[in-house]
Image: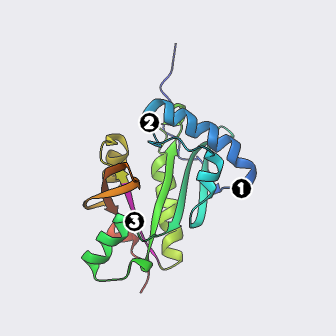
Amino acid sequence: MSRTPALRSDTPVRPRRAPDLPACVEALAQVHKADGYPTNWPAHPADWLAGGSLIGAWVAELDGRVAGHVALCRSGADDVAPALWSEREGVGAEETAVVSRLFVAPGARGHGIGARLLARVVAEAGERGLYPVLDVVASDTSATALYERTGWQFLGTGEQHWSPRQTVTVRCYAAPESAAPPS
């Protein structure tokens, strides 16, 4: 008989360390199998998690095991969410940071881990004077529900070109207004 996990408020969120990467890859593989995220499984998932224009990354633990992950990255020239935010607010995209690589292992869901990871990455962006934005594949309704439930503001949709033959529609969000960095 399976029990529904109780909501836990004591789930620690801490900076990701290199020894965490194998557990992160294991959790990511579970997410990919259950939800299809990431859409294209990376050839080297640990490099995918650790790469890019990374500002920082964090993990959440549940019962001593890595249960979730989030990263904060500098915005790139092709990122849709920073462009929409900049257009809306009249600021440069360099004033934004992109929330990325957010996932929670299927067996760890229902504990508020996704919301805790989002809160941590938003706090980090604010400490750096950056405004957090993100995009999500339009078909990922569970991630969209998390962002909207936690107060993220829908900015619009756009097209991401992942390869010469793959273009996807993404929904773009900005952190809640309460997350604005100090002026």
For label 2, count other residues whose C-alpha is less than 10 Å away and answer few (under 14), some (14-19) or many (20+).
some
Q: Which kind of residue does numbered mark 2 sit on?
A: Gly
Camera-side residue of 164 and 108: 164
- Residue at image coords 60%, 64%: 56
Label 3 secondary element: loop
Left or right, 125 with reference to 175 = right
Q: Which residue lies furthest to the right in this view?
A: 19
Residue 145 sits above or below residue 173 on the image? above
- Residue at image coords 71%, 55%: 17
Q: Report the magenta residues as a range.
A: 130-135
Question: For mark 3, what is the residue?
Answer: 79
Question: For mark 1, what is the residue?
Answer: 17
Q: Quadrant of the C terminus?
A: bottom left
Q: Where residue 66 appears, x then y in whole percent? A: 64, 42
- Residue at image coords 47%, 42%: 40
Residue 20 shows in the view = yes
Question: For mark 2, what is the residue?
Answer: 36
Residue 66 sits above or below residue 154 on the image? above
Left or right, 25 with reference to 173 = right
Q: Which kind of residue does numbered mark 1 sit on?
A: Arg
For label 3, count other residues whose C-alpha is less than 10 Å away and answer few (under 14), some (14-19) or many (20+).
many
Residue 49 sits above or below residue 73 on the image? above
Compute the Cα span from label 1 to label 3: 26 Å
Residue 151 shows in the view = no
